[in-house]
Image (cartoon, rainbow, N blue to C red):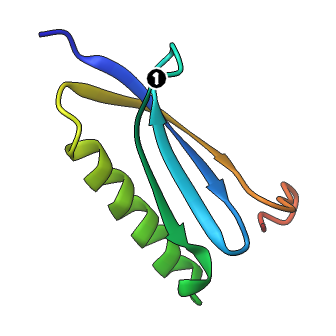
Amino acid sequence: MNTKRIVAGIDVGGTHTKIGFADSEGNIFSERTLLTRDYKVFDEFVKALSTTIEQMKNNIAGVELVGIGIGAPNGNYYKGTI
């Protein structure tokens, strides 16, 4: 069995964070949404996001997660903030 290479796309928004897994042909394997505002502490948000990604990956047979891309509002490279 060949392992399918997939990537995760994450869109961090003010109210919702959307996560999706896709392959290089654009096929969507999984999608999920977290409520961004449920996490008042950034570390709790990152932990929930990490756990969600791992659970999503584990629910898809025969895939290898090879990358993650993140879009965030008002990202400031110099300050390291969003």
Percent from the top left, x then y, of residue 67? 48, 32
Where, quadrant-wise, is the C terminus in this rendering? bottom right
Instruction: Locate residue 18 relative to residue 58 in the image: left or right.
Output: right
Residue at 45%, 63% in the rendered image: 49
Percent from the top left, x then y, of residue 70? 64, 47
Percent from the top left, x then y, of residue 62? 19, 25
Q: What residue type is labelled 1?
A: Asn
Q: Nearer the viewer, residue 50 or 37?
A: 37
Residue holding disc 1: 27
Give the secondary structure at mark 1.
loop
Q: Quadrant of residue 61?
A: top left
Q: Residue furthest top?
A: 2
Instruction: Locate residue 51 relative to residue 16 in the image: left or right.
Output: left
Vertical placement of residue 15 versus 2, above or below: below
Residue at 40%, 60% in the rendered image: 50
Instruction: Locate residue 26 relative to residue 28 in the image: left or right.
Output: right
Tally the numbered discs.
1
Q: Quadrant of residue 23?
A: top left
Q: Which of 20 and 54 is in front in this view?
A: 20
Q: Nearer the viewer, residue 60 or 64?
A: 60
Q: Nearer the viewer, residue 33 or 12?
A: 33
Percent from the top left, x then y, of residue 79? 85, 66
Residue at 36%, 20% in the rendered image: 5
Q: Residue furthest left?
A: 1
Crowding near the residue tagged with mark 1, few <14, some 14–19, many ≥20 C-alpha atoms within 10 Å: few
Where, quadrant-wise, is the N terminus in this rendering? top left
Instruction: Locate residue 62 relative to residue 44 in the image: left or right.
Output: left
